[in-house]
Image (spheres, rainbow, N blue to C red):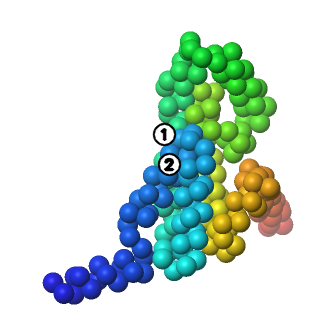
Amino acid sequence: MSSLLLAVHVHRHLHGPSIDYAGLGLAAGVGWVGVPGVGEAALIAAGVLAAGGRLDLAEVVSVAFVGAAIGGVAGWLIGLKVGFSVVAGPGPLRGARLRVLAVGERFYRRYGVMAVFFTPSWLAGINRMRSRRYLIVNAVSAVLWAVVVGVGAYLIGPSIEDVVSDAGLAGIVVIAVAGVVVEIVRRRRSRSESRVRD
């Protein structure tokens, strides 16, 4: 019995209480469903706690990624199933809500998959983005968000919020995605050149 208590104490001391991770995952999920600021604030706090040794950075990034990915899918499903009828339905500010839908539709028509990086997840659902495409892009954006904000908070503290807001997380994500695309194109060219030589 005493060895079990010691193991629990060591795990809690080294990895932090599970409630911290559960709270982070929940906040990330809620943020990616469409409540602004909640997930980012929790991730910054968790990154700072990890820098102080109270949480594990790898677990912080992993939990934030999972929460964001699940929240993104939930928001997309909400948008897909009921989003249009809720946003376009009768009630206060209906004209403004219809304008938001029109702008979102033009944005998705013009930028396609890249629009996911700049808009709430429910807007991808309302605009009927295909599941395969959305799931991939949602996962990529969730992992980039978790790594950039989580590791940034770990390394430079709460001022990561200023860096992200100045540079724009979307801008950072676009640069990262562009880097991945350039690398994929480079590898494909390299493979085709090696086939031509053979």
Mark 1 lies on a secondary structure that is: helix
Query: Crowdedness of circle 1 by 10 Å Cα count: few (<14), some, many (20+)?
Result: many
User: Which dot marks residue 24?
Assistant: none
In the displayed orientation, state which residue is furthest to the left: 1
| Residue located 56% across and 50% down the image | 38
Quadrant including the C terminus:
bottom right
Image coords of residue 46 (percent x, y): 54, 66
Q: Is residue 117 above or below residue 159?
A: above
**Mark 2 touching mark 1, by CB under 8 A?**
yes
Q: Position of residue 80 (x, y in %)?
A: 53, 28
- Residue type (three-letter) at the residue carrying disc 1: Ala
Give the number of the disc on residue 74: 1
Percent x, y of residue 68: 54, 51
Say which of marks 2 and 1 sits in front: 2
- Camera sees residue 75: yes
Local packing at callout 2 (Cα closer than 10 Å; few below 14, some 14-19, many 20+) is: many
Tell me how far mark 2 sits from mark 1, CA to CA.
Answer: 8 Å
Name the one closer to the observer, 14 or 77.
Answer: 14
* Label located before the other in sequence (2 or 1): 2
* Residue pictured at 61% horizontal, 49% vertical: 37
Q: Tell me where residue 137 appears, x and y as whole percent.
A: 63, 47
**Is residue 113 visible in the rendered structure shown here?**
no
Classify residue 188 as left or right of residue 20: right
Mark 2 lies on a secondary structure that is helix
Image point (76%, 61%), residue name:
163
At a point 15% along the width and 84% down the height, the residue shown is 1
Q: Which residue is mark 2?
A: 29
Residue 42 sits in quarter? bottom right
Tell which of 173 and 160 is nearer to you. Answer: 160
Is 196 situated left or right of 147 in this image? Answer: right
| Extreme residue toward the top, this view | 90
